[in-house]
Amino acid sequence: MSHDVRSFEGQVYALYDAILDRTPDAGGLEYWVGALKNGAALRDVADQFLRSAEMQAKFGGLDDRGFVAHLYETALHRSGEAAGIDGWAGALGHGATRADVAVGFALSAENVASLQSALSAGIYVDDHAATDAARLYYTLLDRAPDAGGLQAWTQALKGGLSEAGMVRAFLGSGEYQAKHGGLSDAAFVDMLYENALGRHAEAGGLASWTGALGHGASRAEVALGIAQSEEAHHHLASQIEQGWHLA
């Protein structure tokens, strides 16, 4: 599907290019476009990019002038002229945030012009209902979806079933009960972390989610929260958005 930079997809693409110096992965694109559609501001998305482990690993520790020079290289693909670096660094020194400056570079006429051919060629957009259904298979049943099940649940989601409803159905299924029935709250949360995030729950996350369960949250709500997290989108991208692996 083709886009211009005014679309949510185009704006997210521009932020990936300007801040992380790469094209978006399908899972990340889906997650952040969804965030914008749900009311997040673009500067808030930029701030999350700047705080990400990927940004810190690639470009962490830059002072203001180094940060501006980085944006010239990644967004505009050239070295910054002295006046431009002075201007942007001065803005940072007088209250502008790095997220504000990053958005300024990402949506600048120069960067938009450089991205237009890529945006016109099209950004990969997957079947969101099928992606959401597959992610719940991995999260709750710890397996790839079978073709018939994926088709049925995808159509159900497109027909108005909520993801929460699908989660409740999975939790009540014979397959889930055979695999994971009888888990304590802590073991349930850790199982979700392992399936959706590929790791055990850290102490803080475990305490937060088990606390939520202890104060009235349902297991369906907790499972959906973990399955819909940015980390789950990224962890499961290779199995889901970048090529289906059907059981």
Image (cartoon, rainbow, N blue to C red):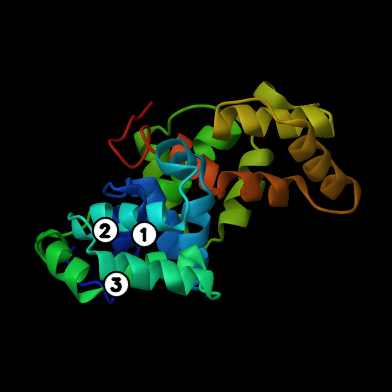
Kindly tell me whether residue 106 is visible in this rendering. no
CB atoms at circles 2 and 3 under 8 Å apart? no
Looking at the picture, does residue 44 appear above or below residue 18? below
Residue 136, given in percent of the width and then of the height, sits at 53, 42
User: Eyeballing the image, is 108 above or below 188?
Assistant: below
Residue located beneath label 1 in the image: 68
Per the rendering, the mark at residue 72 is: 2
State the separation of the CA atoms marked 1 and 2: 6 Å
Which residue: 29% across, 48% down? 21
Going 90% across and 52% down the picture, which residue do you hit? 215
Classify the position of the C terminus by image quarter.
top left
State which tag comes first along the sequence, 1 or 3. 1
234 or 100: nearer the viewer: 100
Circle 1/circle 2 CB separation < 8 Å: yes
Residue 7 image position (x, y, % from top left): 29, 74
Q: Which mark is residue 243?
A: none
How packed mark 3 is, by other alpha carbons closer than 10 Å (few <14, some 14-19, many 20 or more), is some
Tell me which amino acid carries mark 2: Tyr
For label 3, the residue is 107
Along the line of sight, the residue nearer the viewer: 186 or 207: 207
